[in-house]
Image (spheres, grey):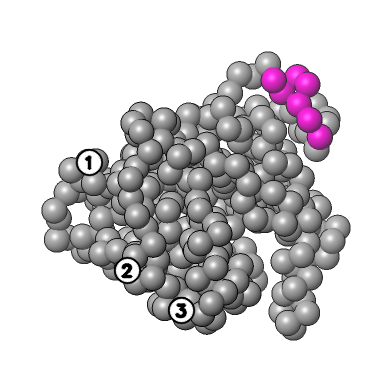
Amino acid sequence: MDLWLEQLLINNRSPLFNAARVKAFGITPLNIEYEPIFRSIYPNCSQFNQQILKLPADKFALNLWTLWLPLAMLIATWRKSQSRPLIQGILAGQGTGKSTLASILILILGEMGYRTCSLSLDDLYKTYESRLILKQQDPRLIWRGPPGTHDLDLGVNVLDALHQPSSDAVIQLPRFDKSAYNGAGDRGISEAVSRADIILFEGWFVGVRPIDLGVFDTAPPPIITDSDRQFARDMNAKLADYLPLWERIDRLILLYPLDYRWALQWRQQAEHQAKSLGKSGMSDSEIVQFVNYFWQSLHPELFIKPSLSVDLVIEIIGDRSWGKIY
């Protein structure tokens, strides 16, 4: 390996195992030497970065060494602790990098011998036609995203099928095509999988449960008007319908931005980048309206907190790098 990479391995050690040991295991730190595994998987992971992630080589290697690999090993340990496939929930808001995390974990866990697939909460959206009917019933649901816009029966059936131990059955994972109907989106071509060891189930409110209605009386902006508060209460009530889906989750990881308002900045950056590449994108005012819509339905300050019943919290700081792990 290059000298800079050797120095990186020497000078950086991941706190992840130590930080997670009490909550995840209730035992002393794991005495796992992951340097040989790092050296084994690095070539293929580096190639993936060059083709897909396109991070600077040193930043990618540091993330792989200090976060992604030890996290994959922790998830593998959770898988070994049970007799059936592991459904690993990842709760993360807009812009926190949940899709990137799922992609790199699939690669690393695959290199370690685990068949891993991902399912996004977005993949469970109702069809375009069903959402048109839904919008007629409740005009407040101007976009997909909030509770009530997902096919929960589909989600439960898919997770139940994936959870079966030692099954050779081919399971069709739903996939959502966000480009259909001029960006409104529709059910896309499903992906066939079988004998998955680990299922990464990610989404912006995966695992989130209803809260006390009293908090909406003094809810933070952009929940301002009486109609805003009623919408928030109604979305909160809809979360009860998601509980059977959350019950299928074995473990839950939270990617927690120290300031939820960074999501607006991150979304603007993404849209500006898309436009610079000649792609279509929203204006800044449209982005504000879009992000506020999500915050009005399930406000991060009220619903997405480290106090949730999760197995691991990874703090995300302003530049989208990670902070404390506990």
Identify the amino acid type marked 1: Gln
Q: Nearer the viewer, residue 12 or 259?
A: 12
Q: Is residue 120 visible?
A: yes
Q: Which mark is residue 111?
A: 2
**Residue under circle 3?**
1
Proximity of marks 1 and 2: CB atoms separated by less than 8 Å: no
Identify the amino acid type marked 3: Met
Q: Residue at x 65, y 55 (%)?
A: 321
The answer to whether residue 27 is left or right of residue 233 is left
In magenta, the rendered stretch is 215-221
Image height check: is 218 above or below 278? above
Image height check: is 58 above or below 173? below
Q: Nearer the viewer, residue 51 or 302?
A: 51
Q: CA distance from mark 3 to mark 1?
A: 36 Å
Identify the amino acid type marked 2: Glu
**Residue under circle 1?**
82
Measuring from the top left, give residue 265's x and y in whole percent: 78, 56
> Is disc 1 surrounded by few (<14), some (14 to 19) or many (20+) residues within 10 Å?
few
